[in-house]
Amino acid sequence: MAGSARARQEIRRFLAIGAVQVAELDLDGDQAVLRPGPGNPPITHGEVFVLVRRHGRPVGTLLAHVPQGADPRVVLAARARAECAGAESGAPGEPPYASVVVATRERAGQLARALDSLLAQDHPRFEIVVVDNAPVTNGTRELVERKYAERVRYVCEPVPGLAVAHNTGLAAVRGEVVAFTDDDVVADPRWLTELTAPFAADAALGCATGLILPARLTTPAQVLLESHGGFAKGFTPRTYDPADPPVDEPLFPFTAGRFGSGANMAFRTDVLRSVGGFDPATGAGTPARGGDDLYGFVRVLAGGHRLRYTPYALVWHHHRETWRDLETQAYGYGAGLTAYLTAVLVNRPALLPAFLARLPRGLAHARALTAVRAADGAGGGGLPGDHDARTHPWPRRLSRLQRRGMVYGPVGYLKARHALRASVRRAG
């Protein structure tokens, strides 16, 4: 009875979470330009989640309240100037020829929005490849051929699974660097340049990741997820080097989720190909549920290549909207985490000793990852750029689902490998 009462209380708290406006504020000297986030209405009074830019580059976020009757631009600019530091100086440099791969399945409306933003990139030379994964209709093909035929290449991959689709895209691209993003994002116009320019500056760089922020915060599920950090990794650029492991990352490189996410990642094309791409038995659309991006990060780092995180490469992500979505996501994240670790050890057994040496701390990390996270306070955010204000408590049910997913992950990976072999036999 106590458990069911607690569950009902969690649901009531969840449903009481109010919507938050999303805005961008660009500070340039004494000037401050405020605009709504992509697809959002004009900013009024109430709670506002703000991306702060300086000279166009993201430098932090803040959660602020605009009183009724006040000028949102004045209120938010004052907060931003007081709390958000400036960006690194200097332009990103000349980026290499790049390819963008977008894997999709039966979401033509979202895909069109993503492609429109990708075609507006300021990158001097790039191509876009859409991989239609296990389609059941002709909707994606018809969209690309009707609206984007001369600017976007269409590839069909009949075997389901995000990693399979990404490998198909990897085989098709021509760029020196290949970037991956999802069909539910809106890419900032500078995204591709900022994400790929580091490859020209660092010959040892194998992978780069970027910043992911919420496109909308209109439902309780979206606000809850973002109040606990969402997909963002902060606003400090950082390079991870296997030759100089970070002292604050005792599990390096196995805590790959710290490096970035699959909606905003790029690889030197020949490096990703040299490690065999992504494990096709990982990723959404397979029994493994996820982990394909994390697998790619670890394989590249294990090969001796560096990984660069840059907050200046921004995409806006449309978070899932319902409680049921959060349940599915929590279980999938847990499963994907242990599935990718299983995949790494199956494909690179030489990493097993290093993994076992880190296992005790890894278990402690897993417990912390799935703990019931309390709210930091009833209102306002934490330090700008921390992006983990925890303005709402994390429900116990979601923590339990993530732990269950972690237990299931290795089984899911083995099931996915079996299903993949069966698919190949049928195709042959």
Image: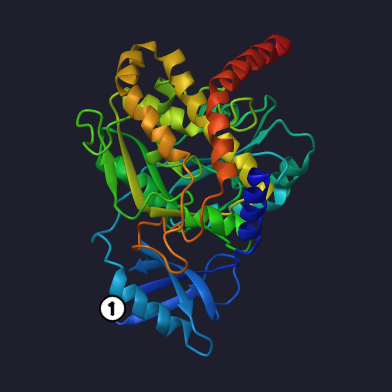
Instruction: Using the rendered image of the protein, determine whether residue 232 is visible from the camera's viewpoint.
Output: yes
- The quadrant of the image that shows the C terminus is top right
Does residue 290 appear anywhere in the picture? no
Front in this rendered view, residue 102 or 64: 64
Measured as percent of width and height from the top left, residue 393 is found at 51, 55
Relative image position of residue 154 (x, y in whole percent): 64, 38
| Tag 1: amino acid | Gly
In the rendered view of the protein, which quadrant contains the N terminus? Answer: top right
Vertical position of residue 222 compared to residue 306: above or below: below
**Residue found at x 43% / y 50%:** 192
Residue pictured at 33% horizontal, 55% vertical: 235
Please name the residue that numbered disc 1 is placed on.
29
Place of residue 157 in the rendered image (x, y in percent of width and height, measured from the top left): 66, 28
The answer to whether 309 is drawn above or below residue 414 in the figure is below
- Residue positioned most to the bottom: 69
Q: How is the image coloured?
A: rainbow
- Dividing the picture into quarters, in which one does residue 50 lie? bottom left
Image: 366 above or below 33:
above
Using a 10 Å C-alpha cutoff, classify the residue at mark 1 as few (fewer than 14 neighbours), some (14 to 19) or many (20 or more): few
Extreme front residue here? 1
Residue drawn where x is 29% and y is 50% of the image: 237
